[in-house]
Amino acid sequence: MKKTGFTLLECLTALSTLSVLAMIAHNIGLPMIQEYRVIAATNSVAGLIREARANAMTDGNRLICDGERGCSSFKRTTILIEGRDTNMNNALEKSEIHHHVKLPSDTWLEWKRFRGTHLRYRNRGATRFQNGHFLICSGNKGRKIIMNWIGRTRIEKAGTECHTI
């Protein structure tokens, strides 16, 4: 009777080969995953910004605020909220929030110098001199959504800004 199967040496060789391939795949795959997380988050935030601007042109004032702290401060966050400030108190109550964006895991957003603690779109879709950019990072990968004072946006790679933070 002929025995079939693998010897211990063959199993250990196959296992060590698979572990080396897994390490290589991890080192190649992690930066790609971070890059795609940043791209997905950037597209979601840019969509929220465009929608807020369009809605401001039709419905009036719109706010974009830090979803973790509300409209009183804007720091590094993982959630953005957007809504219509119907009572004009520079804050968004639960009933005034229309949309929110939650960023993918290990991804964060920082608001780089607009005036104030929230972004306000006025009736004609302008931000009234609130130019600046949103920095979105995951690991050392990042993108910027740059906004001019009339509320228009463009997207660029972040360069080394996510490396230093």
Image (spheres, rainbow, N blue to C red):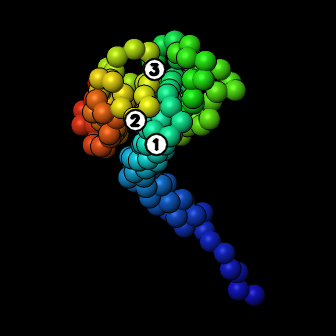
Which residue does the image show at 64% across and 27% down from the upper left? 96
The correct choice, above or below, for 33 with respect to 126 in the image is below
- The residue labelled by disc 2 is 125
The correct choice, above or below, for 89 with respect to 100 in the image is above
Label 3's element? loop
Q: In this view, which residue lies farthest toward the bottom?
A: 1
Depth order, front residue of 125/41: 125
Q: Badge 1, how many Cα within 10 Å: few under 14, some, many 20+?
A: some
Marked residue nearer the N-terminal end (3 or 1): 1
* Three-letter code, disc 1: Ala
Q: Which mark is residue 54?
A: 1
Q: Quadrant of the N terminus?
A: bottom right
- The residue labelled by disc 3 is 118
Which residue does the image show at 33% across and 24% down from the upper left? 128
| Image spot of residue 108 (x, y percent) | 46, 30
Query: Would residue 109 be seen by someone viewing this image from the given angle?
Result: no
Q: Badge 3, how many Cα within 10 Å: few under 14, some, many 20+?
A: many
Mark 2–mark 1 CB contact (< 8 Å): yes
Q: Badge 2, how many Cα within 10 Å: few under 14, some, many 20+?
A: many
